Image: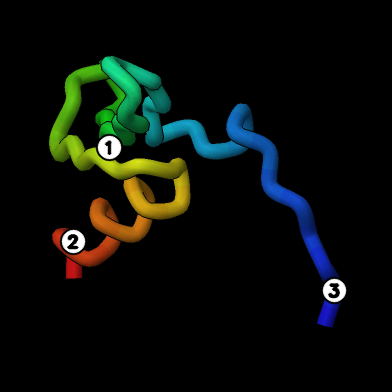
């Protein structure tokens, strides 16, 4: 198994922001419209919340 590092620029349908001491991750469509948005105290927490709401 390889250890691959993913850069944020490779995640084309996710928008990352840092607003008021909180990380915000939004799932966006091809036109840039936000479909789903989640928050967390870290990027990982925000991504995990986004993923949890999708499943």
Query: Which type of secondary structure does the marked residue at label 3 adopt?
Result: loop
C-alpha separation, residue under disc 1 versus residue under disc 3: 27 Å
Query: Of callouts 1 and 2, which one flags the residue occurring earlier in the amino acid sequence?
Result: 1
- Residue 29 or residue 15, whichever sits in front: 15
Q: In the drawing, what numbered circle is on residue 27?
A: 1
Please give the name of the residue rendered at 22% of the width and 66% of the height, measured from the top-left corner. 52
For the view shown, which residue lies furthest in the right direction? 2
C-alpha separation, residue under disc 1 versus residue under disc 2: 10 Å
**Residue 4 x, y percent position in the rendering:** 79, 60
Label 3: how many Cα within 10 Å (few below 14, some 14–19, many 20+): few
Please give the name of the residue rendered at 25% of the width and 52% of the height, measured from the top-left corner. 50
Q: Tell me: residue 6, above or below residue 8.
A: below
Label 1: how many Cα within 10 Å (few below 14, some 14–19, many 20+): many
Q: Is residue 26 left or right of residue 5?
A: left
Its colouring scheme is: rainbow
Q: Are marks 1 and 2 in contact (CB under 8 Å)?
A: yes
Please give the name of the residue rendered at 24% of the width and 39% of the height, measured from the top-left corner. 39
When asked about the image quadrant of residue 28, the answer is top left
**Residue 34 x, y percent position in the rendering:** 18, 26
Q: Which residue is mark 2?
A: 54
Query: Of callouts 2 and 3, which one flags the residue occurring earlier in the amino acid sequence?
Result: 3
- Residue 52 or residue 30, whichever sits in front: 52
Q: Which residue is mark 3?
A: 2
Is the C terminus in the top left, top right, bottom left or bottom right quadrant? bottom left
């Amino acid at each position: 198994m390889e250890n691959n590092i993913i850069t944020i620029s490779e995640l084309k349908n996710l928008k990352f922001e840092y607003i008021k001491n909180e990380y915000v991750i939004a799932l966006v469509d091809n036109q840039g419209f936000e479909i789903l948005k989640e928050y967390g105290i870290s990027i990982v927490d925000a991504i995990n919340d986004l993923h949890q709401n999708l499943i």
